[in-house]
Image (cartoon, rainbow, N blue to C red):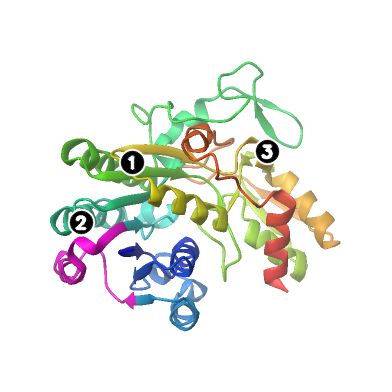
Amino acid sequence: MGVVIVTGSTGLLGSHIARLFADKGVDVVGVDNDLRKDIHAASQWSGEQTRRDLLEHAVDYRHVDADFRDAAAMDRLFAEFGRNVQAVIHCGGAHNRAFCQANPAEAYAINVMGTNVLLETLRKHSKQGAFLYLSSMQVYGEHANGLPLMDLGRRWELLDGHPYADDGVDESMSIDATPHSMLGASQAAADLMVQEYGHSFGMNTASIRVGSIVGPCQGEHPRDDLGLNRLAECAGSGEPFVIHGYQGKQVRDPLHVADLANALWFKFQAPKPASVYNLGGGRSMACSARDAVERMQRLSGKEIELNVEEGAPAGGQAWWVTNTAKFRQEFPMWRPRYDLDALFQSLLDAKQ
């Protein structure tokens, strides 16, 4: 096999991808300058320990301390491998809503210009290589909040009979003519650019729009809108669990990071131009914040106080469940291995 370049390789998702691909015999080059500790303004976001773990334990892993926005640095790196670059898996963008809203120019530089640097560099050195971009449900903007919801007491739910009610939101939802947060707008711009490199240049690109991605990590993960890592910490510390907006009834379909990494392995083996997928836990994983507290209490045996604060975050949604039918139809061997109990238990185990 050739070389796979993974951006954001010391983050939650990037590190899982790097380990999985390296364990399968792929030479992995991780590109990460640990910018996330600045984006999230918290020391626990530093990827230094993850970098050391990867270098020590992941077979055939090499780390490059570089900013993927640096066109000259990326050109040197890609030139080293030439046509042996089999894929770029780009999960190193800025995913923190608050940071992007406060720093729109920086969000654009990271999410749009950085993605363009990687696309252009791959096109120059290894045009046949795959480009897998970890996009987000945020590209749909406020369309997600225009869905007709009903209050079921502990959760919001779509009205019966709605096209998305049974299986969740598919790729047909428009990303146009609606407000976006700066995070959503920058990700949508990058998402469309990734598609266009497939349409215009025949490159094997994929925009993979994910929702709530969860896994054991040092701190809270910005793509986890239910705050499940923080909830697991509260089960151990006895501190109240704080959630913002929607009366604590917001619904997500969390997907364990290991299941997402496995999905990328399937896609890596069967690339094609300009593909787009919604990917999440699906209807069986749908869970509200209030449901999550109840489930974590049951599994941990600890009482957890829930505090709901007013004010939904910019770019937030009251309800999101992902229809994964398109991905599953193309890759029928892929199924999430973590159900809700297993996912929650993995977070509890990591906090012990």
Q: Nearer the viewer, mark 3 or mark 1?
A: 3
* Residue underneath mark 2: 122
* CB-based contact (under 8 Å), mark 3 and mark 1: no
Identified by mark 3, the residue type is Ser
Disc 3 secondary structure class: helix
Label 2 with label 3: CB-CB less than 8 Å? no
- Which residue appears at 62% of the width and 50% of the height? 226
> Which residues fall within the magenta stretch?
63-87
Q: Position of residue 344 (x, y in %)?
A: 71, 57
Q: Residue at x 64, y 62 (%)?
A: 230
**Residue occupied by mark 1:** 188
Name, please, the residue furthest toward the top.
161
In this figure, which residue is indicated by the disc labeled 3? 284
Q: How many badges with numbers are in the image?
A: 3
Question: Which of the marked residues, 2 or 1, is nearer the chain's N terminus?
Answer: 2
Q: Would you say residue 232 sits in the magenta stretch?
A: no
Foreground disc of the pair 2, 3: 2
Up-down: is 23 above or below 261? Answer: below
Q: Amino acid at mark 1?
A: Ala
**First-in-chain label (3 vs 1):** 1
Quadrant containing the C terminus is bottom right
Can you say whether 181 is above or below 125 in the image? Answer: above
Which secondary structure lies at badge 2?
Answer: helix
